[in-house]
Amino acid sequence: MVQFNKRFEADAVPEMAELQREFGIFSAEHGLQRSFTLLGIVPADWNERRRWYKFLDHLKTYPSDRDGVNGHDRVVEAFKEDLESGAPLPISLVCHSAADDPRVTVSRGRPVVFASDVHVIVSIPTTPSRVVRQQIAKTVRERRARELSMQ
C-alpha cells in the first residue's frame, strides 16, 4: 500500500489528474489490474503480483457503500470521480475490519492522525488470515458431517 499511497499523494495528484484526462486510466472499460499495472503499482515479485491481481479481481465480489455497485467498480469510480474533479484530492488506500463493515467504502478525511491534507479515503474490508482459516475449517467440518449423515 505504501507504493500505492505514494503515487496518489498530494504532490503527485496534478500529474495523476493529467494522466486521467489524457488517457482515461480509470474507467468502466479498464479493470483495476490494468490501471494499476499501467501506473506501475504492482509488486516486483511475480508470485506476489499474481496474488495482487487475484485480490483486485476478487473485489468484484465485495459490496460497496454505493447501492448496486460492487467493491471493484466502486474503487474505479472513486479514482475517476476524484481525478476528473475540478480540485482533485490525494487518494489513500486503507483497510478496515470486515467484521465492522463488509463493504468497500469511500469517504473524505485525514487517513492518519498526523495527515495535514484531506484525502479521498478508499477503505477495503479485510479479515485476518487466521479467521479465514478457521472459517474454512468450520465449513469443511460441517460439509463432512452432512456427507456422513447422508450415508
Image (spheres, rainbow, N blue to C red):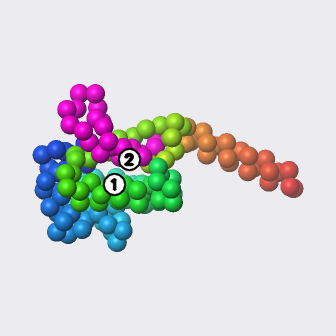
- Which of the 4 image quarters holds residue 47? bottom left
Instruction: Identify the residue at horizontal 35%, vertical 59% (top origin).
Output: 76
Q: Is residue 105 visible?
A: yes
* 85 displayed left or right of 33: left
Residue type beneath disc 2: Val
Residue 11 picture location, percent across and down: 12, 46
Query: Where 107 sits versus 40, above or below?
Result: above
Kindly identify which numbered label has been placed on residue 96.
Answer: none
Circles 1 and 2, Cβ within 8 Å, touching? The answer is: yes
Above or below, comparing residue 8 to residue 72 in the picture: above
Which residue is denoted by mark 2 in the rendering? Answer: 106
**Callout 1: helix, strand or loop?**
helix
Question: In terms of sequence position, does the residue under pointer 1 or pointer 2 come before the other?
Answer: 1
What's under tag 1, amino acid-wise?
A: Ala
Which image quarter holds the N terminus? top left
| Residue 78 badge | 1
Neighbourhood count class around disc 2 (C-alpha, 10 Å): few under 14, some 14–19, many 20 upward: many
Visible residue check, residue 50: no
In the rendered structure, does residue 120 fall within the stretch colored magenta? yes
Residue 14, given in percent of the width and then of the height, sits at 13, 53
Residue 115 is left or right of residue 72, and the answer is left
Residue 72: x, y in percent? Answer: 42, 58
Which residues make up the magenta segment? 105-128
Identify the residue at image location x=40%, y=56%: 74
